[in-house]
Image: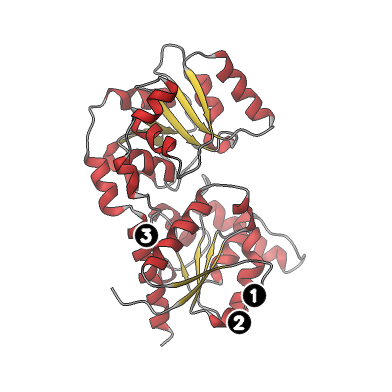
Amino acid sequence: MEKPDMKLLVIAPLSIGVIYGGVRMQAIKTSEQLAKLGVDVHYYNPWETYDPTAFDIIHLFLAGNETLTIAKKLGDINCKLAVSPVFFTRRSAEVIRGFVKVESIASRLVNGIFSDYSIKASVCRTADIVLPNTASEAALIRDGLGIKDQYLSVIPNGVDKRFADAGPDLFISQYNIQNFTLFVGDCSAPRKNILPLLKQHSSEDKPLVLIGTFDDSSYSASCLEIINSRENVVYAGPFKQDDPMLASAYAAADVFTLPSEFETPGIAALEAALAGCKIAITEVGGTREIFGDHAEYIDPQNKSTYMQAIQKAHEKPGSHSLKDRILEHYTWEATGAQTLKAYNRILRQSD
């Protein structure tokens, strides 16, 4: 790989300061690996003043309303811009394309008519390269938002190698539970489908452990009401990503599940698989590209498939094949190397 000699400005939405989700993880871990590869990484602080032209590359994480204005400004001054859009929807590319076309016509007559799709399209159009996480996301961006293949480069999310060495004892000694199903994520987000999962889970099923956060919404209240009424459902609260208890929970669980409306493809699922979990995950959002035949798949619109997939996963014999696949292809080291390759590609085009 070419020796890097570049100055990079990383820009993420302000919301990552209070929402500890996938966008934050992707931005931080990718940047850390780029720094290890010799890139001079700077993190954007809105309270500081920058000369964007002083950077060889500016990398914008998330195409959305929070990043639209800055993306347009950077495009106006011809900065070299990479965008990780973090985009998926259950709507078809044809439907998205129709939204974008109608709003393009309407905006000529009335200012301020934009859907989330048009905003994402506008951000992506400013970029020299767009970096979706999966081929499915790339297809939506190409066919729905109208971004040509030449501007797309698929770079999967990664996982910390340390999860491969996780042991179960810490979690088991604290919670005295084994052979369970585990969920890790934002429990309060309806997209994650925790409420229907709880409704489908019964006292006859393997214990269910939830790790994550609940908020003050009525959705969270409904989830907690069920949790508090069940002896075989455990809410362990939130753990930080570097907490040894989280890694131990992955190692202690038999099956990890994400029954979400979609995942791209779910960093927590990668972590769990690397720790040795069997996987039962949504079929929507490019998950099959990552997990292949090594997972059981859930149709998030068909609630009966939630426990069917989880039960089938519990019945499968243990295997190292998925763990080996992730170590080979889906580490943050691989993500950093592929990102640097994409940067070099657009820099060569300007030579």
Which one is in front, 171 or 305?
A: 171
Q: Separation of disc 1 and disc 3 at Cα?
A: 27 Å
Position of 46 with respect to 176 (left or right) is: right
Q: Quadrant of residue 228?
A: top right
Q: Secondary structure at mark 3?
A: helix
Three-letter amino acid code at disc 1? Lys
Residue in view at x 42 percent, y 46 percent: 265
Q: Separation of disc 3 and disc 2 at Cα?
A: 28 Å
The reply to whether residue 259 is in sight is no
Which residue does the numbered mark 2 point to in the structure image? 77
Residue in view at x 63 percent, y 29 percent: 220
Front label number (1 vs 3): 3
Q: Quadrant of residue 278?
A: top left
Q: Secondary structure at mark 1?
A: helix
Which residue does the numbered mark 3 point to in the structure image? 335
Which one is in front, 159 or 93?
A: 159
Q: Secondary structure at mark 2?
A: loop
Which residue does the numbered mark 1 point to in the structure image? 73
